């Protein structure tokens, strides 16, 4: 179910929360200070399009008591092929995967104490962007990426690569330009992350394409038990900034409620 609550968000890391504000700072402040990862080393994994300020702002909100670990970017293309052998490590996944036996990933990512995945989608106009499920494939060795690219999302290779590294939390940043609002989604569940963002995009595009659950990448991830398997397992806290106008507030409530309904999640009574 989805429930609208007053900020701050729950500090329970397992809780999925969506915050809507006038800008990134306004949305992030609704989370308060999350208290997970006290004293541990936090590694940030990001596609590389996010500004350093945005990454640090997210880091300070979600793990304010953690030690700063590295920020890891994808090592794609020829640059990835030329990296020294110690940069990569083979991760055995054949017990759960159907096609791959192992995946070569950055050793710093595989050995990280905790991983925070940050993906800013505000400028991404792709019809099916990389959200969370496909994010890990961006960090894999270029040869593995090539296999996934030719295999396609329906082939399932991208989801098998996702078995190689676990992220402790995903923070996705999106926007509603028609209402001039910024959304921040925080969740531990890789499938929930994709479902909510796909639902929001479908609403904004006013499209009648296949629903989020029918997305090939989501279906492949479900088959591999990467996250939730049905809508009954999804529980969302929604927070809306008091700085928004009444029109924006109404639009935010409508948008989040409709997005939740698209993935089979209903408003709490």
Image (cartoon, grey):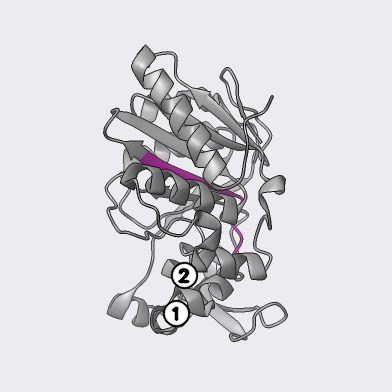
First in sequence: mark 1 or mark 2? 2
Q: Main secondary structure of the magenta part?
A: strand
At x 41% / y 39%, what residue is drawn? 56
At x 71% / y 47%, what residue is drawn? 233
Query: Which mark, by number, is residue 148?
Result: 1
The spot of residue 218 in percent (x, y) is 55, 63
> Residue placed farthest to the front in the image?
208
Judged from the image, the secondary structure of the residue bearing numbered disc 1 is helix
Q: Residues within 10 Å of mark 2 (few under 14, many from 20)?
A: many
Say which of marks 1 and 2 sits in front: 1
Q: 177 and 41: which one is in front? A: 177
Q: Are marks 1 and 2 in contact (CB under 8 Å)?
A: yes
Q: Is residue 149 above or below residue 230?
A: below
- Mark 2 = which residue? 137
- Distance from disc 1 to disc 2, alpha carbons, whole Å, reads 8 Å
Q: 213 and 4: which one is in front? A: 213
- Please indicate whether residue 43 sits to the left or right of residue 82 in the image: right
Q: Is residue 28 visible?
A: no
Which span is picked out in magenta? 165-174
Q: How many marks?
A: 2
Query: Which mark, by number, is residue 220?
Result: none
The spot of residue 61 in percent (x, y) is 51, 32
Q: 219 and 23: which one is in front? A: 219
At x 35% / y 17%, what residue is drawn? 247
């Amino acid at each position: 179910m989805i429930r609208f609550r007053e900020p701050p968000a729950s500090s329970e890391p397992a809780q999925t929360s969506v915050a809507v504000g006038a800008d990134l700072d306004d949305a992030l402040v609704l989370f308060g200070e999350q208290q997970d990862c006290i004293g541990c080393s936090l590694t940030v994994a990001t596609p590389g399009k996010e500004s350093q300020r945005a990454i640090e702002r997210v880091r300070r909100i979600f793990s304010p008591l953690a030690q700063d670990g590295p920020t890891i970017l994808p090592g794609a293309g020829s640059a990835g092929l030329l990296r020294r052998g110690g940069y990569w490590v083979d991760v055995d996944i054949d017990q759960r995967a159907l096609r791959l036996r192992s995946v070569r990933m950055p050793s710093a990512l595989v050995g990280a104490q905790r991983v925070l995945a940050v993906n800013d989608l505000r400028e991404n106009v792709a019809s099916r962007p990389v959200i969370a499920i496909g994010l890990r494939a961006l960090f894999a060795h270029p040869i593995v990426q090539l296999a996934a690219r030719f295999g396609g999302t329906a082939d399932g290779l991208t989801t098998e690569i996702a078995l190689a590294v676990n992220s402790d939390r995903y923070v996705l940043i999106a926007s509603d330009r028609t209402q001039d609002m910024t959304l921040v989604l925080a969740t531990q569940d890789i499938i929930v992350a994709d479902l909510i963002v796909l639902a929001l995009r479908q609403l904004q595009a006013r499209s009648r394409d296949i629903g989020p659950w029918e997305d090939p990448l989501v279906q492949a991830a479900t088959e591999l038990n990467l996250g939730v398997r049905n809508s009954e397992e999804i529980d969302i806290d929604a927070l809306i900034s008091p700085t928004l106008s009444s029109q924006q507030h109404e639009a935010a409530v409508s948008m989040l409620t409709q997005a939740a309904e698209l993935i089979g999640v209903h408003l709490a009574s």
